[in-house]
Image (cartoon, helix red, strand yellow):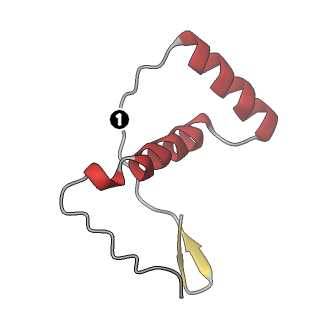
């Protein structure tokens, strides 16, 4: 979801197929059942973590951090 003003607006999602191991499936389902967070949300969060980890390898990315202010 994206925040616009003070309201949450659902973001459009793209459907894709991801193949995971039976162990990953079991752990994700157990986590989702315990937390009531959908497996798809955990997969999206995992993708975000990987993208952040490898951000410097994405084309056209320049880090403009100039130290703390």
Residue under label 1: 16
Front residue (pair 68, 6): 68
List the single residue furthest toward the right: 34
Quarter of the image where one finds residue 17: top left
| Above or below, 58 relative to 28 | below
Q: Tell me what residue is drawn at x 47 percent, y 79 percent.
A: 67
x and y percent of residue 21 in the render? Answer: 50, 14
Give the structural element (helix, strand or loop) at label 1. loop
- Image-based side of 30 in relation to 11, left or right: right
x and y percent of residue 12 in the render? Answer: 40, 58
Q: Tell me what residue is drawn at x 63 percent, y 39 percent.
A: 38
| Above or below, 9 relative to 25 | below
Quadrant of the rendering where the C terminus is positioned = bottom right
x and y percent of residue 3 in the render? Answer: 55, 75
Q: Tell me what residue is drawn at x 35 percent, y 35 percent.
A: 16
Q: Tell me what residue is drawn at x 65 percent, y 17 percent.
A: 26
Quadrant of the rendering where the N terminus is positioned = bottom right
- Label 1, residues with CA under 10 Å away: few <14, some 14-19, many ≥20: few
List the single residue furthest toward the top: 22
List the single residue furthest toward the front: 67
- Image-based side of 64 in relation to 36, left or right: left
Front residue (pair 42, 15): 42
- Image-based side of 66 in relation to 30, left or right: left
| Above or below, 39 relative to 44 | above
x and y percent of residue 37 in the render? Answer: 69, 43
């Amino acid at each position: 979801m994206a925040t616009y003003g003070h309201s949450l607006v659902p973001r459009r999602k793209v459907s894709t197929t991801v193949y995971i191991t039976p162990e990953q499936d079991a752990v994700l389902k157990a986590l989702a059942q315990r937390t009531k967070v959908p497996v798809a949300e955990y997969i999206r969060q995992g993708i975000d973590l990987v993208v952040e980890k490898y951000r410097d390898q994405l084309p056209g990315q320049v880090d403009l951090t100039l130290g703390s202010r």
